Image: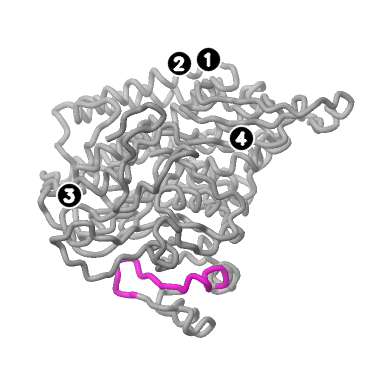
Amino acid sequence: MVLERVDPELVEFDVRTDELMVNMGPQHPSTHGVLRLVLRTDGEVVREVIPYIGYLHRCAEKIGENVAARQWIPYTDRMDYLAGMNMNLGWALTVEKLLKLEVPERARHLRVLIAELNRIASHLVAAGAFGLDLGSFTPFVHCFREREKILDLFERVCGARLTYSYITIGGVMADLPRGWLEECEAFLASFEPVIDDLHALLTSNAILIRRTAGIGVLSPEMAVSYGCTGPVLRASGVDWDLRRDGEPWCTRTYDGYRFEVIAQTGGRYPQDAPYPPVPAAVVLGDSWHRFYVRMLEVVQSVKLVRQAMDYYRKSPPGVGEPLRLTQRLPKGEAYLETEAPKGQMGFMVVSDGSAIPWRARARSSSFCNLSVVSELCRGCLIADVPAIVGSLDIVLGEIDR
Amino acid sequence: MDTPAILEKLKQHFGPRITGSNLEAIDPWVEVAPGALPDVCRFLRDEPELRFNMLHCISGVDYLQTDPKKKPEWGPHLEVMYHLSSLIHRHRLVLKVLLPRWKDNVERELPEVPSVSGIWKTALWHEREVYDLSGVRFQGHPDLRRILCPEDWVGHPLRKDYQMPLEYHGIRGK
């Protein structure tokens, strides 16, 4: 399929109008939360995008200076509320890095199991909402039906559906309930055919390709310069994943696991499953690739969950003791980034030797991913703005903290 | 390159402008004089052996002990930390800049540090955040506005002596 793209500037040339400021958000359905974009438009062409954030600022870092390290875990849940487990993991690993604390083998595998399930859930929201932004409602319902099953599994593990506080400093809060692994296996078996459905509904959908191919092309240099990470970075062809390339404190969790980093290198994606081919019209780093990378990562996460279940069965009992609230932290600073579904989520803890951190810092992946939006939207059509913002997969709870 | 080699290279090039370091820390850091920051950063990014092409995070940390019972080892100051890494050579570095809490010890005059937003674009928003929450003025930043707090907000919340306002547009604080 060959698509002819007409430069929007040429189309608009005959009908040049006055510039108009259009306010999009903060209550716009396609801004994924409370993001406000002010568009300076010239007819249909967007000349400039000015993002305004902070509507969901809840002073998380200030609160972190006033509570014990473990008490901050519920606040990390509320950052990326679509991937609370990954946020818990990031903060827990950071404090463990400061304490030089090892977690039991079973807790390590539980962390991988839970974090990868949450990655699937987060990517399902991203894919579904992306389709919704572009006007197709059906895939959204399919995605949310599957995500609901994952949330049911999480509810059985820790009692919560969104704000888990399950992964904690020193291990995890509880072992799996009886019969959970069988339920999880049943879910994976029922979920795999749905991936093919989603590919049919979205990935190879001609309308979706037309709406996203060549839209919002992010070059690898720009992605690195803006600090874009996660699927946004990998969709630009940068082979970088902290689960493989991160600091030992992060990669150790994934010791012994086999998975592929989804990035197009040498003109092709790693092919270990029958994915739909890349259409001819798309350009590396455009909105379509960002969506595609997430779809392929879901398959890798399914593989990781299966491996984690095997490891879990072989591991000795004991999921670790949560850090006591009065436990003093050693003096010093520790900064650690982990691979969250949206990108590299970094936490820093500065300690003066007491139980309460002197400073708790959260480096948000969506924050950096969103900062590139004014570059991507320059010169695009108004209708393409939701396609670009949707493909970045931001969560405002994490941006505003 | 490992951190001691990076530090050696920086010391060769910048001499006394590298004002301190700690290689035993969990994340080894190098302290840079505020005025030398843009030069050091450009060197770190462009030198073929270093190529620190990604700036991950800029954080401001306020060191002011407000509890009179505690005797801190440090005097009141402000630290700005830059977490860098190279996706090419796979090494990491932390840069620190130490600043007075107020410029020339005049209360409410923000301390200044040169912006690195021309070197890494990540700094565009991160410096705005540090300005907003920790109160550091980044010289040469193209658009230094508050980012998380409203534009008419008073004070910098992550300062240790920050007081919640009693009232904001008819909303009761405290």
Q: Relative to the observer, which residue lies in front, A205 or B99?
A: B99
Subunit under mark 4: A
Q: Specify the amino acid type for callout 1.
A: Phe
Q: Is residue A270 something that shows in the picture?
A: yes
Q: Which mark is residue A263?
A: none
Chain-order first, disc 4 or disc 1: 1
- Magenta segment boundaries in residue numbering: B22-39
Q: Position of residue A155 (x, y in %)?
A: 23, 25
* Residue positioned 50% across, 39% down in the render: B151
- Neighbour tally class for label 4: few under 14, some 14-19, many 20 plus, Cα within 10 Å: many
Q: Is residue B141 left or right of residue B150?
A: right
Q: Relative to the observer, which residue lies in front, A185 or B53?
A: B53
Where A315 falls versus A148 (above or below)?
Answer: below
Q: Are marks 1 and 2 in contact (CB under 8 Å)?
A: yes
Q: Does the stretch in magenta take in B34?
A: yes
Q: Residue furthest right?
A: A14
Q: Position of residue A342 (x, y in %)?
A: 44, 40
Q: Does the stretch in magenta take in A125?
A: no
Q: Is residue A238 something that shows in the picture?
A: no
